[in-house]
Image (cartoon, helix red, strand yellow):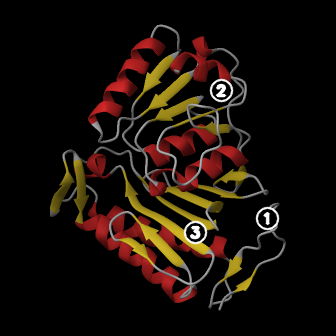
Amino acid sequence: MSSTEHPSTNNGVELPIGASGRTAKEIAVAAVGLAERIIASGYSKVQQFRYKGRRDVVTDTDIAAENAIKGLIREEFPDHAILAEESGVAAGQADFQWIVDPLDGTFNYSQAIPVFCTSIALAYRGEVILGVIKDPLRRELYLAVKGRGATLNGRPMRVSGKTEISNAAIGFDLGYDEAMRKKALEQAAVLLPMAGTLRLFGSAALSLALTAAGRYDAFYHHWLFPWDLAAGILLVAEAGGCVTDWEGNPVTLTTRSLLASNPILHDKILAILR
């Protein structure tokens, strides 16, 4: 069994320490580092890939990066559960669960479009307490621990201070469900004459990180899975932002649709998009 790190997060949960004596935070950073090297080595090269569904691609790099991440977590925390995009759930006995997306933005990656990332989160009884997102091409590390704030490459980061939608950069993505894709585009058409600009990057995890860093002023999506949002929602919250579903309720790991933004714009955008 793993021991724990002090001090605890503000919900009373102590971050676990792995078999090597490293903290969960250090291990998560090491894990995205492993993925970064694998992703960088395969970028712009011809790869074997297959379609999990229409538009939903998985490459050899996804599998290799996921296996490397899971291998490290298993060495450090053999009793923890793991939920990973490509391999599903690996059961564990502990209250802790790691949520892993080895390569968010795989379609971009397969086309050599330089917008993708690795996302790793740790949840305790369903609540995310640690989130790490790594942009391997820009070498940017986004990190948050519940109750301790969020950082970008070790420096504190905050959501934007924009007050008007007319000046806002709003991101959105489409996902793979046809009805939800249509809904997102319909909302984009409503926002287009109001917002400063709209952007669609094809990586929900990275878009949430950009929102936490104040680069996006808001981001919305209608077809998300736990590995898409787990790290990002904590980053936004710890950077001072708001993340809710369309009814204004807090986002959980089972939420499919969300709006993330700074607290000034959140209700304004939510009212429009409803």
Residue 186 place in picture, x, y as percent: 37, 19
Q: Quadrant of residue 80?
A: bottom right
> Label 3 to label 1, Cα distance in Å?
18 Å
The spot of residue 6 in percent (x, y) is: 82, 76
Mark 2 → mark 3, Cα distance in angstroms: 30 Å
Q: Which amino acid lies under the numbered mark 3 shown in the image of this protein?
A: Val
Kindly indicate the quadrant of the structure image that contains residue 204: top left
Label 3 secondary element: helix
- Work out whether 5 lies above or below 252: below
Q: Tell me, for residue 266, which label it has, or none.
A: 2
Which residue has dot 1 on it?
9
Name the element at disc 2.
Answer: helix
Does residue 217 show up?
yes
Q: Which mark is residue 29?
A: 3
Q: Earlier in the sequence, mark 1 or mark 2?
A: 1
Please tell me which residue lies in front, 19 or 177: 177
Disc 1 marks which amino acid? Thr
